[in-house]
Amino acid sequence: MEHWDPEKDLERKRLELLAEYSTDMIAQVSQEGLFTYVSPSAADLFDRPIDLVLGKSIYEFVYPEDRPLLYNASQPLIKGEAETTKVVLRAVKGNGELCWIEACSRLIGDPSLGGARDSAVFIRNIDDRKQLEDRLREQAMVDGLTGLSNRRVFDDRIAAAWADAAFRKSEISLLFLDIDHFKSFN
């Protein structure tokens, strides 16, 4: 018979309280990829009742095009080549909308907490961060004075066109215009 330890009971209650009030989703995922525990924030993140998340594959909640990202990110963890992994991808909510998430995983070190290859997974909605990153990326590609695409856009597009031409084994042409007195033209 196991001896009751009030300190461990208090620690467990604290952890449960933290998981209950965390805005990030805290989950336990089996080696088969099934949610075996999810914190209450899973309902908000996935816009579904918790009972429709528990026991389901983590891949069911990932946008199909992003599933390879999740698979590739989890392989070093599964193979024992990394202690933690992090991946940014799109999740599918219950209403069909997509949201950007960041998922961080770590193998659970205590076999008594689950299977030998279970993972603790922390998932955060990063929609606001992605919107800000997209706005900053757009601003970095446009000249603030003229509103025209800048050299970064040219470099990106010429590299893409060059790669496409090489792939298709076709030719590429580039036309340069030298505009005298550009200031007055502008």
Image (cartoon, helix red, strand yellow):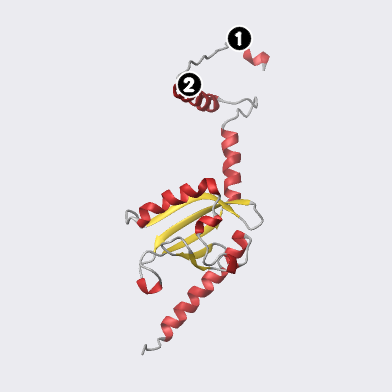
Q: Secondary structure at mark 1?
A: loop
The residue that appears at 46% across and 51% down in the rendered structure is 70
- Which mark is in front, 1 or 2? 2
Q: Earlier in the sequence, mark 1 or mark 2?
A: 2
The residue that appears at 55% across and 27% down in the rendered structure is 153
The residue that appears at 42% across and 83% down in the rendered structure is 7
Which quarter of the rendering shows the C terminus? top right
**Image location of residue 14, percent across then percent down:** 49, 76
Disc 1 marks a residue whose amino acid type is Asp
Which residue, as the protein is rendered here, is positioned at the far top?
180
The residue that appears at 38% across and 52% down in the rendered structure is 75
**Image location of residue 172, percent across then percent down:** 50, 16
Circle 1 residues within 10 Å: few <14, some 14–19, many ≥20: few
Q: Nearer the viewer, residue 94 or 100?
A: 94
Specify the label residue 136 is tagged with: none
> Mark 2 highlights which residue?
165
The image shows residue 182, relative to residue 122, as above or below, that is above
Which quarter of the rendering shows the N terminus? bottom left
Q: Quadrant of residue 147?
A: top right
> Mark 1 highlights which residue?
180
**Image location of residue 60, percent across then percent down:** 54, 56
**Image location of residue 6, percent across then percent down:** 43, 86
Asked whether disc 1 touches disc 2, contact meaning CB atoms under 8 Å apart, the reply is: no
The image shows residue 5, relative to residue 95, as above or below, that is below
Q: CA distance from mark 1 to mark 2?
A: 31 Å
How many numbered marks have been drawn onto this rendered protein structure? 2
Circle 2 residues within 10 Å: few <14, some 14–19, many ≥20: few
Disc 2 marks a residue whose amino acid type is Ala
Q: Secondary structure at mark 2?
A: helix
Q: Nearer the viewer, residue 108 or 180?
A: 108
